[in-house]
Amino acid sequence: ELRNTWIYQGDMGIYVRKSHRNPSEAEYLDLASISLPEKYRGKGVLTSLLSLMKKLSEDYGLAGACVESVLEDRLKPFLLTQGFTQREDNFFWKRTQNEQMGL
């Protein structure tokens, strides 16, 4: 079962949770917070994390993955290149393959 939790690896930390998102009220895996020191930026850490979130969303039968409260402007175009859709100014989501196909 997925739980709301902080996950730490060395001096990096992420907070993930399962949540309901409109319009469908389906369940999504949220990346709610990330602490990534500058020395790790541009090294593929976030790309790997987003791939893992997509896989976990599919494995647990969730509708997709969300990244919320994106305050770092350089992340917004990056998330778009990773297949996320911007729903609000600081909120991005990506549906799983099953959700896109209506399964």
Image (cartoon, helix red, strand yellow):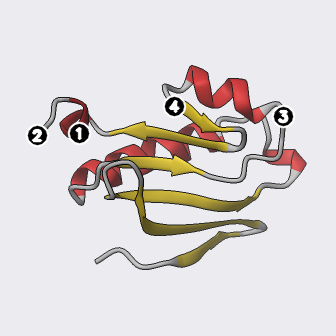
Q: Residue 46, image x and y in percent?
A: 63, 43
Gap between marks 2 and 1 measured at Cα: 6 Å
Which residue occupies 83% across, 42% down?
A: 72
Contact between labelled residues 1 and 4, with CB atoms less than 8 Å apart: no
Label disc, if present, on residue 73 of the rendered structure: 3
Q: Amino acid at mark 4?
A: Phe
Using the image as rendered, state which of residue 51 and residue 68 is in the foreground. Answer: 68
Gap between marks 3 and 2 measured at Cα: 34 Å
Where disc 4 sits, the SS reads loop
Q: Earlier in the sequence, mark 3 or mark 1?
A: 3
Q: Residue 93, image x and y in percent?
A: 49, 41
Q: Earlier in the sequence, mark 4 or mark 1?
A: 4
Dividing the picture into quadrants, the one containing residue 73 is: top right
Gap between marks 4 and 2 measured at Cα: 20 Å
Mark 3, other Cα within 10 Å: few <14 / some 14–19 / many ≥20: few
Q: Earlier in the sequence, mark 4 or mark 2?
A: 4
Label disc, if present, on residue 84 of the rendered structure: 4
Q: Is residue 41 left or right of residue 64?
A: right
- Kindly identify which residue carries mark 1: 99
Which residue occupies 41% across, 79% down?
A: 3
Contact between labelled residues 1 and 2, with CB atoms less than 8 Å apart: yes
Which residue occupies 67% across, 27% down?
A: 78
- Kindly identify which residue carries mark 2: 103
